[in-house]
Amino acid sequence: MSDLKKLKKDIHRWSQELGFDQMGVSGVEIEKDEEKLIQWLKNNHHGSMKYMEKYGKKRARPYELIPGALRVISFRMTYHFFDKEMSEKRIDDNTNAYIANYALGRDYHKTIRSKLKEIISRISEHSNIIEKNYFVDSAPVLERALARNAGLGWIGKNTNLINKNHGSWFFIAEIITDIELEIDHPATNHCGSCKECIDVCPTSAIVAPYELDARKCVSYLTIESKESIPKEMRKSIGNRIFGCDDCQIFCPWNKFAKKPVIDDFKPREAFEDASLKSLFKWTKEEWDEKTKGSAIRRTGYHGWLRNIAVALGNSKKETSTVDLLKSRKGDASSMVDEHIDWALEQQLSD
């Protein structure tokens, strides 16, 4: 066995020991995906995510991000998820908050980054690249395209990576290297004629197969956007206060998904089956404490209150809800107050 073949087998073994479910290797060329990215940006489907356009074509050129790059090693790690039946119950219960499955536990960046660092330390003697070259949703690279080429799954009509044997409830990460490891076969597409994800999207954000308009996506509206949520989108958000899983919940391939082996992603007690009212009462200090080490911090405290106000507006009409909304007026910002006013209108309407 050649040294490179042995090294690849070793990396696979190390990754499994650290809790990764799969690894694969691809080249660094993804020209067709670069063309799609440029068109997506031209359509302004990235909304206010200026960082998506900041690096432009560099996202599709790992060799510009890491000089000397020849290969990308992609990894897949499953996170905690509720099955379809339980997920539907959580969405339909408008008194409780729906938080995207990936954010219920520890911030995945922290968990996966530490594991990639360990793998890097073991293979560093084989590489001349000395700068940081491992990424967990933290660099201008088209991760899903690279993971697809590495055989980890195909990019589905919902734009998520889907694995034929494991569904889509997983994170992906990568190491960019100058080691000429053997390249794996790209994954083939198995979406077929199914369009379940398009049909169930609450805000019709999947504007065409394989094309997502982020400006309409609940995840964008409740996490990435720091502005007011458009009024025409608020009813459709329902009780989703951080992200959305609908296009995964109803994806037929997720019937094959397997539970994770990493305990870090187990739901925190503060987030599982939490009532909207209890979360809306959190002070800034409570929010800081209870979201420590959580991906939920990305939305910020004001975004958190904004999102819950909308969900309360969509919840069952109750005097206690009206009283709670009124009690939070003036506590945070004019943006939050505007969403509270909208929620009160919904609660008090005939």
Image (cartoon, rainbow, N blue to C red):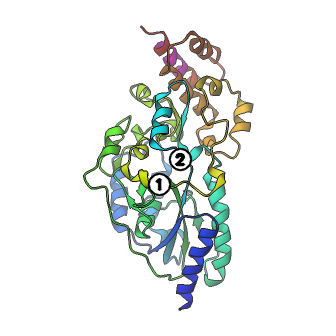
Secondary element at tag 1 = loop
Q: Residue at x 57, y 57 (%)?
A: 138
Task: Please state which amino acid type lies under the numbered disc 1.
Answer: Ala
Image position of 33 (left or right of 263):
left
User: Which quadrant of the figure has residue 291?
Assistant: top right
State left or right for residue 104 relative to residue 196: right
Q: Quadrant of the C terminus?
A: top left
User: Disc 1 or 2, which lies upstream in sequence?
Assistant: 2
**From what the image shows, is residue 212 above or below residue 183?**
above
Q: Which mark is residue 81?
A: 2
Looking at the rendering, which quadrant does residue 121 occupy?
bottom right
Q: Amino acid at mark 2?
A: Phe
Q: Going 33% across and 58% down the picture, which residue do you hit? A: 36
The residue identified by callout 1 is: 257
Whether 140 is among the magenta residues is no
Taking 238 as reference, is 113 above or below it?
below
Q: Position of residue 94 (x, y in %)?
A: 50, 25
